Amino acid sequence: MKKFRKIGVAAVGVLTLTALVSGCGTANTTNSTPSSSAPVPTGNAGTTGKLEIFSWWTGVASSKALKALIHVFNEKYPHVQVINEAVAGGAGSNAHAVLASRMTNNNPPGTFQVHAGNGSLYSWVQAGDLDSLNNLYQSQGWLNKYPKSLLNLITFNGNIYAVPVDMQRANVLWYNPSIFKKYNLTPPTTFSQFFQDAKVLKAHGITPLALANHGNWETTLLFSDVLLGTVGYTDYNKLLHGQMSWNSPGVVQAANTFTKMMQYTNSDASALHWQQADQLVANGQAAMNVMGDWAQGYFKTTLNLTPGKDFGWAPTPGTQGVFSVVSDVFALPSKLSASQKAVALNFLKVLGSAEGQKVFNPLKGTFSPRLDANPSDYDAYSQAAMKSYQKDQLTLCIGQGAVNPGFTTAFENAMAIFVTNHNTKQFIQSIENAAQTNPLS
Amino acid sequence: MDVQLAKTGPERRRKRLSSGKIWSMITLIPSMILLLIFVYGFIGWTGWVSTTAWNSIIPNFLSVGLKNYQIVFQTFRFQSDIRNMVVFTVLFILICLIVGLCLALLIDQRIKAESFFRSLYLFPMAISAVATGVVWSWLLNPDTGVNLILKAFGLKHVPQWFLSTRIVPGIPGGQIQIGIPIALLAVLIASVWQMSGFAMAVYLAGLRGIPDELKEAAKIDGANAWRTFWSVILPQLKATTTTIIIILTAASLKVFGLIYAMTGPGQDFVTDMPSMNMFQTTYQGDQFAQGAVISIVMLILIALFIIPYLISTLREEE
C-alpha cells in the first residue's frame, strides 16, 4: 500500500503544479517611474557586453531575416555577444507569456518584439516598463523617415516608445485570378459586390470565401476588416479607442454582414489553420480568403506561385485607401542597467536604419516602413503594398496589437460563440461588456 | 579486530540508526522547504491573487473578495469548460480502464511475441501530446482522413468529428447546454489511443502479481473462466485499478497539449478545457486574477479526487 501512497503523493505534487502556472510572476514590483528619454550612447558606450533579443521569430523566413539583421549589427559591433531569445508558437502569444514573467521579475531582455498599437505595447508603457526613444529618433533623424501616421501608433503621451522594423497589412483579400476570369468576375470592392460574386461562385460549386479558424483569431481578423469596411476609417478608430459605443448601428450592421458571409465559407473552418485556407484558394477549391499579407510568403515561397498571375490581392471590401497595420516594433525596457541600455540602443539604431531594414525585410517577406525604402528591393506584392502604405490612412487590426489584451481575449471568446450561434444581439452585448471591463481609452 | 567489531556490533548499529535518522532529516529538510515555498506557498499566493484586482499587465493587489470568481463562473466559456472536463474525465477513464484491461487479459494468455504486442500498445504514450494532436486532427478532419474511407464505403452522412457543435442531450443549464459535446468524442479517441496502453501495462503487472495458487484453487473448485475472472482476478486488481484511476485523472484534468494542437477551444467552446482557458486568460489576456481563479478551481476539483484516496490509503496503513 505504501507504494500506492507514494504514487498518490507524487500525483498530488505534480497536480498542484497546474495551480502554480499562473503564479509564476512575483509580487516584487518596483514602481519605477518612466524615465525621460533614454540617452543615446556616444563614443565607446554599448560596444561590448551581451544583448538579448526577444522575439517570436522562429519560422524559417523570419529567423533567417533576424539572423541576417544580427549579422549586420555584429559587423558594426563585433564585441557584443547577441543572444537570440526567440520563443516559438501561438503567433507571439507564448512569447508574450514568457516576456510577462521576465518583466515582472525585473529580468527584462535587452529589447523585445511587440506589435505597434494600443495592445501589449501600450500595456508596457502604462506599467512604466519602457524608456522613451525620443532622443534616439532625434539623433538618428528618424522623425521624417517614418510616416507621422505610423509614429502615432507607437507614441503615447507625446513620447515614442518603439522602433518599427517591418510592415505587414491585415486587410487583404487574396483571390484566385483564374477562377475570377473563368466566371467573368472582378475582385469585390464593396460588400454587395462580394455577395453577388459569392452567389455566382457558389452556384458553380466553388467555395466563395475560404476561412480558417483553428485559433479563433482568424475570424477576429476577418471581422475586424468587415467592421472597417462597414463603418469606415473614422468610426473604426473611434471604436478602437473607446470613443464610440460598440452597441452602435454600424457594428450591428458589420455583424450581420459577417454572418451573411459565413454562408459562403467552407464548413470545416475551425479545423483549418490559415495556410490551409489559402491552400484552398491556391488550388481552386475556393475563390477568396481574407488574411494578413504574411499569406503572400506562403503563396510565393511554400507553394511556388507567381504574384499577380497565380494569386491576386485587393484591399478587403470597403477598405480602399486604408492600410491596416501589423508592424513589428522593438522597445527598450526601462529596468535595464545603463550599460545594457547602451548596447540595446545601438541595436535599435541598426534595426531602424535603412541598411538594416533592407537586409531584414526581403528575407522575411515584409517591407521596410521607412519612407526612403527602395521599392526595387522588393517583389511585386510588396511594391504594391508599399505604395498603398505610403499614401493610405493607417489603422490597426483587432487581435494584432490594436487594443488591450484583455479586450482582445474577450473579443475572441465572443467570436467563438458568434460563429456558431450567429446571435448578433448576444455578440454585441458581449463586446460591449468586454469594452467596459477592459477600457479601450 | 574482528572480535572487537563483533562485540560492539549492536551498540554501533543503534548509533548508526539514529545518525541515519538525523541524516534523513537533514536531507529531507531542503526539499521540504522548497516544497513549502514553491508548491504550497505559491498555491496560497495564487489563491490570494485570485481575490485581487490584478487584471492587466500591471500588478494590482487591491482586494476585491470573490468578485473574480463571480465573473469567471458566469462566463459561457468557463461553464463550458467545467462541463467538458467532467464529461471528458469520466469517459476517458472509463474507456481507458476497459480497453486497458481487455488488452492486458489478451496479452496475458501467454501468447507468442508478447513483448512485441506490449510495446506496440504502450508506444503511443511515448509520442508527445502535440504530435498526437496534430496527426489526429488530420485523421479526423471531416473533409480528409478517415471520412474518405467511410465515404468510399458508401456512407452518406459522415461524422463531423471535432467540428460538431452538437451537445447531447443538450439540456439548457446556466448559459450553456448540458450534455456530451459530440466534438469531445473525437478528442477522446485520440487520448484513449494514447493512454490505454498505459492502463494495459499497469493491469498486466497486476495480473502477473496474482498468485497462480488462487487461479488453480478456483479451477479445482470448478469455476469456469468467466467466474474465475469475475470472482478471483478482478477483486485482486482493485488496488491496480485505483492507481490507474488516480494517474489518469491527473492526466485528464491537466490535458492541454493534445487539445491545443488538435482542436483548439473549438466553436462554441465544445472542446475547451479549464487549462486552456487559464492559459489564454492569464498569458494572452493578461487577466492574472481571473487566471488564478481558474487555477484554484482546477486545484479544488483535483483535490476532490485525490484527498479521499489519500485518506483511505492512510487508514489502510494504520
Image (spheres, helix red, strand yellow):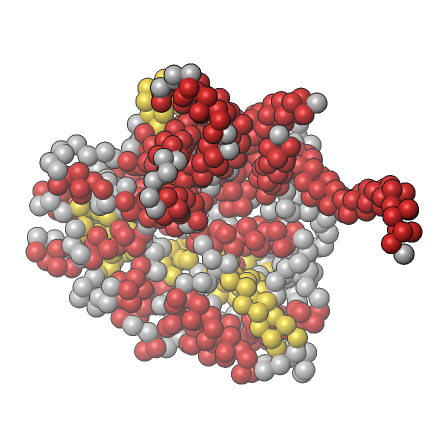
Q: Residue furthest front?
A: B3
Residue A65 lies left or right of residue B312; in this view the side is left
Q: Can you give x and y, in whole percent of width and height, for residue B175 in the image?
A: 42, 23
Q: Is A117 located above or below residue B37 in the figure?
A: below
Q: Which picture quadrant has residue B306?
A: top right
In this orientation, which residue lies closer to the viewer: A80 or A2? A2
Where on the picture, by quarter, is residue A426?
Answer: top left
Tell me: residue A212, above or below residue B79.
Answer: below
In which image quadrant can residue A174 be found? bottom left
Residue at 42% in and 19% down: B220
Q: Position of residue A228 (x, y in %)?
A: 35, 47
Return the x and y of residue A243 as percentages of the image width and height: 48, 42
- The residue lying at 24 percent from left, 67 percent from top is A304
The residue drawn where x is 38% and y is 72% is A363
Counting labels gives: 0
Give x and y (percent) for residue A274.
31, 52
Residue at point 9%, 42% (across, down): A203
Which quadrant holds the N terminus of chain A? Answer: top right
User: Which residue is at the front of the view, B213 or A78?
Assistant: B213
Residue B69 at least partly seen: no
Q: From this viewpoint, is residue B147 visible? A: yes
Residue B284 drawn above or below residue B277: below
The one nearer the camera, B202 or B145, is: B202
Q: Horizontal placement of B219 versus A207: left or right?
A: right
Q: Nearer the viewer, residue B228 or B193?
A: B228
